Image: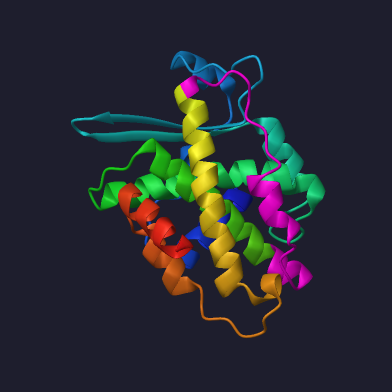
Amino acid sequence: MQLLEGIQSILERTYALNNAHSVSRFLVTCPKVLETLGLAPGPHGCAERVLLAEGEGGMDLAVYLDADLLERLSGTDPLEDLHDDNLGDFLTALEGVSHFVYVVWNAMLGKQITLLELELQAEVDKFVVASQLLARQRGGVPRALHDRLFQHFRLIPDLSADQRRRYLDASRYAGDYCRILARRYMGRVNGRRETPPIAPELRHFYRLTQRGKLRHIAAQRA
């Protein structure tokens, strides 16, 4: 799908990644696929999941995105016009692509990742990509974007205690980091005209392990 490939291209360009695999080739939109894996959507539905199975011969990977969500996004391309009405669906699709890119890139390097690390990077990716698009489309990044992503969100009720804690931790750490990014590197957010280039910081953070990411955030807070 062109939108998903566009998101993947933005992520790979932002973080200077080389990836020979296209997310569109791994896309699944049929809920029955989830059912065959014992991952049927709960009572509140499931709009996005990354399905991963590791074996001795390699790794099986699929990205599930709800067909209705993709249909809604086809009506207005958020890469050209991101607004309140399509932001939620866009962020959901972006999360799936983010997971795909991060899993594949680390697998190609033979690096193991944790679920918290995966969710943390996805939350950062949402802010970074949405900021890029809004800056290009509207000439600046609204101050409300950070609050929308890290304050005004809801978790689905049927999460396990471990899942809920992981998502909340990922949001908290990413929120702190993105607040630092906005203050130091996004002049249109904090009112300064001249700011240092953000790319080296983003690319350094992307390549850190979970422990490295958390230490980096803590050091930046100081």
**Quadrant of residue 16 within the rendered picture:** bottom left
Residue 92 in sight here:
yes
Outermost bottom residue: 194
- As drawn, is 22 to the left or to the right of 134? left
- State which region is magenta: 134-161
**Quadrant of residue 114 within the rendered picture:** top left
- Percent across and percent down for residue 144 are 75, 56
The residue that appears at 43% across and 57% down in the rendered structure is 217
Outermost front residue: 222
Residue 182 sits inside the magenta stretch: no
| Relative vertical location of residue 179 with respect to residue 104 in this rendering, above or below | below
- In front of the other: 56 or 206: 206
The residue that appears at 67% across and 81% down in the rendered structure is 192
- As drawn, is 104 to the left or to the right of 124? left
- In front of the other: 69 or 206: 206
The residue that appears at 67% across and 44% down in the rendered structure is 151
- In front of the other: 21 or 83: 83
Residue 159 sits inside the magenta stretch: yes
- As drawn, is 78 to the left or to the right of 38? right
Outermost left residue: 56
